[in-house]
Image (cartoon, rainbow, N blue to C red):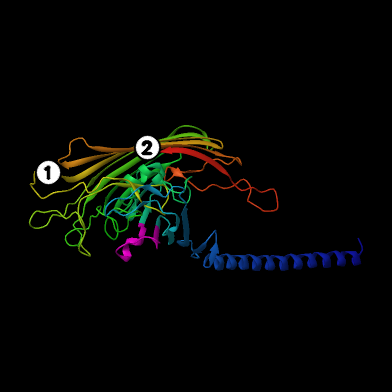
Amino acid sequence: MTSQQALETKSNAEEIKAIRKELELKSGKMEMLEEKIKTAEKGKMKSVPGLHYESSDGNFTASIDGRIQIDSQSNLINEVLPATGTDLPYELNSGANIRRARLGVEGTFLKNWDYKFEYDFSRGAGTVAAGITDAFLRYNFDNPLSIKVGSFKEPFSLEEATSNRFYTFVERHMSVNTFVDNPNTYKTGIGLNYAVPRWQFGIAFQTEPVGGFGQSVSSVNANGNQSRNNGSGDIGWQGIGRITGRPWMIDETKYLHVGISAGHTTVNNQYRADGSFSQVNSTPGQNSGGMSFVAFLGTNVDRTNVLNTGNLTSGPVGGADSRRIDSYDRFGAESALVYGPFSAQAEFLRTNINGLGYSGEHLTGYYGYLSYFLTGESRVYHVRNGAWNRITPNSNFHWKGPGWGAWELAAGYDI
């Protein structure tokens, strides 16, 4: 090698070294820039879907979401029974109604904590607070165990545990509405939950809902109030629990779900000072006592009662014909089979009445239905709730294109 060639080789080596150094500097700057972008993105609102916020260290998140659901109803036969005397017409009215109008925020903080607050503007007959549904804090242990305090749903029934965004029909079935939803499934208390893919259980010790029992109901229960002592809060308590599992399971599209629920709820009876009982709440801000169970048709447009027990407390204290409901016990059994696009679901519920003048009286209800996804989807399981979750279509719906979305055919029986 000549001296000239040696000089050229040395020059090339130095040039390559300089290029490498420059590339390293640029690479470092790119990494710093990417890190800054990531940090900035964590502190901004995102669509995931909905509005989502995440702090730069990931210790705090917040997501804002909401829903509006509209029910409509048209009756071919309007007059169900001719009215007589001074009775009002017995009609099933046609029309439309905003069933739910909810806005809420939920998220996490300090890694193991999460929270949820939701308000339903379609509720709240009586107080502003009555529109509150979920309002709780929850601590998630390192294992599948969690504990929460605040206002939240009772752990009872497969259909009640399923969000109203994800069940098959327009409304929950009558038995679930009568024994769980109508008396208000959102109550204040403390709950414990354990959930793994094959089984789950939840227990809770709760009292009246925010806004007073019967004021934040999702339907109508005029006698189901539990805000006592002239409205200052002489409360009733309940212990309630649910255990569910999938004893047979091939995969997430083929399994059998079973579960049982049970609960004991105390009822307050507001007697007047002279021992008489107020059947009707005639004084604003003062709630009548006792309890009634009602059922209406499977929409929320016309709430005509197809079942109404009337107030289960009646008559003065010590009266010959007086009755008093002190508590009621609820029991439920549930089952669901999922096999690809086919599914079947059924529940049986029973409520026992306890108190003066009652001996073995009870109410029962049940439903069952079959479902088939014509487009091939399979029902999705929500492990923490032991219930159904959002269906994701195999292909999105398009007016011009191959996508059909998800189409489901379902039929059932409800009593």
| C-alpha distance separating marks 1 and 2 | 32 Å
Residue 122 drawn in magenta:
yes
Query: Against 299, is 376 above or below?
Result: above
Q: Is disc 2 surrounded by few (<14), some (14 to 19) or many (20+) residues within 10 Å?
A: some
Q: In the rendered structure, are the residues bearing label 1 and label 2 in contact, judged by CB atoms less than 8 Å apart?
A: no
Nearer the observer, 281 or 262: 281
Q: Which residue occupies the extreme top position in the image?
A: 248
Who is closer to the viewer here, 59 or 286?
A: 286
Whichever of callouts 1 and 2 sits on the residue coming sooner in the sequence is 1
Question: Where is residue 185 shown, x and y percent of the image?
Answer: 33, 50
Q: Is residue 96 above or below residue 196?
A: below
- Image quadrant containing the C terminus: top left
Q: Nearer the viewer, residue 99 or 389?
A: 99
Q: Amino acid at mark 2?
A: Tyr
Residue matched to label 2: 366
Q: Is residue 27 magenta?
A: no
- Residue 321's label in the rendered image is 1
Judged from the image, the secondary structure of the residue bearing numbered disc 1 is: loop
Q: Which residues are magenta?
A: 115-136
- Residue type highlighted by circle 1: Asp
Q: Which mark is residue 133?
A: none
Residue occupying the point 11% across, 54% down: 276
- Find residue 247 and report its image quarter: top left
Direction from residue 1 to residue 182 in the image, left or right: left
Q: State the image coordinates of residue 24 (x, y, percent, origin top left).
A: 69, 65
Q: Residues within 10 Å of mark 1 (few under 14, many from 20)?
A: few
Residue at the location (29% across, 61% down)? Answer: 211
Identify the residue at image location x=44%, y=54%.
94
